[in-house]
Amino acid sequence: MNNICLVTGSSGLIGSESVSFFSNKFDQIIGIDNNMRMQFFGKEASTEWNTLRLQSEVANFKHHAADIRNLNELEVIFQQYGSDIKLIVHTAAQPSHDWAANDPITDFTVNANGTLNMLEMCRKHCPKATFIFTSTNKVYGDTPNFLPLIEQEKRWEISESHPYYKEGIDELMSIDHTKHSVFGASKVAADVMVQEYGNYFGMNTAVFRGGCLTGPNHSGTKLHGFLSYLMKCAITGDKYTVFGYKGKQVRDNIHSWDLVNMFWHYHQAPRGGQVYNAGGGRFSNCSMAEAVEMCQIITGKPMNYEYTEANRIGDHIWWISDVSKFKNHFPEWHHHYNIQDILTQIYAATTARVGAH
Ligand SMILES: NC(=O)c1ccc[n+]([C@@H]2O[C@H](COP(=O)([O-])OP(=O)(O)OC[C@H]3O[C@@H](n4cnc5c(N)ncnc54)[C@H](O)[C@@H]3O)[C@@H](O)[C@H]2O)c1
């Protein structure tokens, strides 16, 4: 074996998409995932089904149930594969704002220390590998909420005269002097460290700051996985709660395949230490109200939802990622799946998984 791709969080949404995507591009795919998502969010968020699916579908996939916080466990894996590792896609994380506030130490040790462990393993065993990190737009904290937003019938929008109107928010927005939430702060620590391993050590590291990442393989749950959980409720009839902003908050949504395709383009011509906003952009976005409407049309039945005045702390009112920096660096890349495609796929996959119509 001399061409290995290593994926952390390999049973999660982005990790599992990476395993499938890269399986015919590398000799072997090594997955690291200890199903900590179940510990975070309970049984319904378990990613074990996805581990089993990958093990049966992807012939060159090898799973390790290691914990990225445990350097000794990582050392064993990296010693085994060494410089054959050409690409690392690091997605393992505690991904929720609300959860992080209840246990900041676990959140930080997974998100920040875990990322540092991965960077060090890469520097020690395969320093020439490409290192991809899935960061988040929450590193910008609540700064976007102070933009001049206009209330429309079904969504908040930015004023047409604003520079962000055309393409969305770019990477130059400050990540300082803002309320990040505990989760946002642990991701900032990791994000900056990944940049540093590129800028200081000259490694091929890249930070992808995701908007809403989504797709049919998300184990959606109340605290994480917006569209996936929304569609699950639309199918089962479980009550969905909309938090604040009149239900008009706007998120951009990128299909996991489109994001992983970004990683692939980057890996073929890496530029160390770069930061890219990575979301659906103007191509794929919706407000909460619009998403509910689309779910109702797709399932053909009304949703059972309620509205609560209090918004989630640090939740964005309007976020559209400007992906033009990435497109300038990699002009061949473009979005494939819009919001309609995404919801239709989630509907099909969720119906099959939860078995209800
Ligand atoms: N989903 C989104 O909307 C979104 C948005 C922006 C950024 N991100 C970031 O993208 C990345 C991937 O997100 P996702 O939606 O695929 O998450 P996910 O929860 O579906 O997948 C993460 C996986 O990591 C595993 N994991 C967690 N802690 C671990 C540990 N200590 N050791 C080993 N494995 C561990 C989990 O079991 C899970 O399977 C995360 O870093 C997240 O912060 C996600």
Image (cartoon, rainbow, N blue to C red):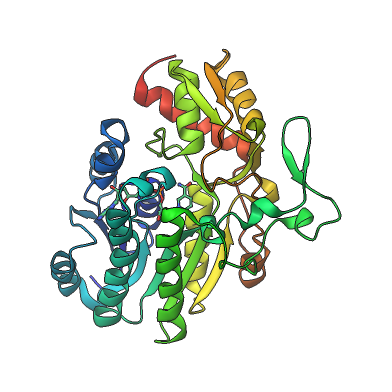
Q: Residue 108: which quarter of the image?
A: bottom left
Residue that appears at 29% across and 42% down: 40
x then y, percent, for residue 68: 24, 61
Q: Is residue 317 above or below residue 348?
A: below
Q: Quadrant of residue 317?
A: top right
* Number of marks drawn: 0
| x then y, percent, for residue 347 | 49, 27
Decide which of 37, 313 is in the foreground and name it: 313
Image quarter where the N terminus lies is bottom left
In the image, residue 91 sits, relative to residue 151, either above or below, namely: below
**Which residue lies most toward the right here?**
161
Q: Residue at x 47, y 84 (%)?
A: 199
Q: Quadrant of the C terminus?
A: top left
Percent position (x, y) of residue 185? 44, 61
Residue 174 visible, this angle? yes
In the image, residue 326 lies at what x, y percent? 61, 66
Q: Is residue 49 left or right of residue 253?
A: left
Q: Residue at x 47, y 56 (%)?
A: 260
Judged left or right of residue 249, residue 54 is left
**Residue placed most toward the observer, 99 or 341:** 99
Q: Is residue 266 left or right of residue 354?
A: right
Res 60 seen here: no
Please indicate whether residue 130 sits to the left or right of residue 167 in the image. Answer: left
